[in-house]
Amino acid sequence: MKKMMIRGTGRYLPERVVTNDDLSQWMDTSDEWIRQRTGIEERRWIPEEGNVGAADLGLEATKIALDRAGWTPEDLDLIIFATLSPDINFPGSGCLLQSKLGLKSTPALDIRQQCTGFLYGMEIADAYIKSGYANRILFVGSEVHSTGLDISTRGRDVTVIFGDGAGAVCLEGVETDENVGILATSLHAQGDYADALMLEAPASRLSPRLTKEMFDDARIYPTMDGRNVFKLAVKRLPEVSQVVLDKAGLTIEDIDMVIPHQANLRINQFFQKSMNLPDEKIFNNIQKYGNTTAGSIPIALDEVIEQKLIPEKKATVLFAGLGAGVTWGAIIYRFG
Ligand code: UT7
């Protein structure tokens, strides 16, 4: 049976470091508040000049992932691009990345599952591989949040959390009887919570789509019911992780590393406690990058591999996340 194997990973974080102290020059916040409530120390933003988009960050991450896989762009059968901050409204960033890779007809699919983009993307890639429609797939999760944030005090609860960055993963179908690849998945969405974390305008359901009032009323910036999203995350992350463990017939002791979405260090600390995980079995890098949404899990995965935090062979990893939609889920993956 065909199993989907990770062949290479890459990440790209823009060089511009924005510290908590930088933010407190523009809004009423402080390094102490941000560290205490979120664990974030700094994040990366794209340069002020140059019109850098999600596809540009994705391209840099992709080059590294392709190189590590030993592939060229022409080897790809499909590109899956996850972002909530596409370069332009349409066409999707997947098409823009495909062009930047010099490809002329490779299919490109954009998905909009926000913080769970990697989880949905992995399951879609696995389904394409199992059905025989594609065998070598590039997944990219990439965000440019910084150009869309309200950097006044009005937006401080949202703005301090987010950062720019991209992660890329090369995925390949391999015929094997070994118990490797995706061992279990559980993905969910509940649109009842759509307005708990959203960016409302411009919107096709509004007529006109964009007005000066929308700027003045800050409806062009993301809004979040942070407490509610926090409560959902600390409940659902352990729940859905237990579901995938049960499905795979594993216990948490069988997992070499938990790689959660990086939304808030406190969420991940609650999650760690609920799952009874020792410090060395859960990975966090939100301190350096903030919340890079669809980029966060693939960026973290790339760092876990680079820092050799998992066994070289047959490492079993649990990915979990919750974010806008709300969408949430978990996946257990075993390396070959
Ligand atoms: O990846 C997408 C999913 N997103 C998440 O998972 C985010 C989940 N939520 C959170 O991470 C947290 O709710 C936040 C970090 C967004 C906020 O932390 P909190 O502990 O829930 O704070 P709060 O919203 O309850 O606000 C507490 C106080 C308020 O002031 P008052 O009403 O007590 O006077 C806020 O106005 O903190 C104030 N506040 C700030 N103060 C300084 C909110 N943002 C800031 C800020 N700096 N940046």
Image (tube, rainbow, N blue to C red):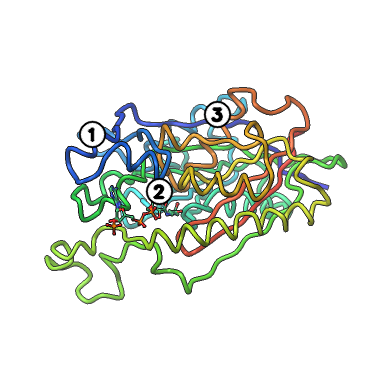
In space, the residues marked 3 and 1 are separated at their CA atoms by: 26 Å
In the rendered structure, find residue 303 and report the number of the disc placed on it: 3
Q: Secondary structure at mark 3?
A: helix
Residue 92 position (above or below residue 284)? below
In space, the residues marked 2 and 3 are separated at their CA atoms by: 24 Å
- Report x, y in % for residue 324: 45, 60
Residue 314 or residue 41, whichever sits in front: 41
- Report x, y in % for residue 6: 66, 36
In space, the residues marked 1 and 2 are separated at their CA atoms by: 30 Å
Residue drawn 61% across and 57% down? 329
| Residue at which label 2 appears | 93
In the rendered structure, find residue 227 and report the number of the disc placed on it: none
Hey, which quadrant is residue 13 in on the image?
top left
Q: Are marks 2 and 3 in contact (CB under 8 Å)?
A: no
Q: Secondary structure at mark 1?
A: helix
Residue 101 or residue 185, whichever sits in front: 185
Which image quarter is the C terminus in? top right
Q: Sort mark 3 into few (<14), some (14-19) or many (20+) by Cα contacts within 10 Å.
A: some
Asked if residue 297 lies left or right of residue 28, the reply is: right
Q: Earlier in the sequence, mark 2 or mark 3?
A: 2
Residue 241 position (above or below residue 180)? below
Asked if residue 327 lies left or right of residue 241, the reply is: left
Q: Nearer the viewer, mark 2 or mark 3?
A: 3
Residue 83 or residue 171, whichever sits in front: 83
Hey, which quadrant is residue 174 in on the image?
top right
Q: Nearer the viewer, mark 3 or mark 1?
A: 1
Q: Amino acid at mark 2?
A: Ser
- Report x, y in % for residue 225: 38, 63
| Residue at which label 1 appears | 22
Asked if residue 261 lies left or right of residue 182, the reply is: left
Mark 3 sits near ligand 1, with its Cβ under 8 Å away: no
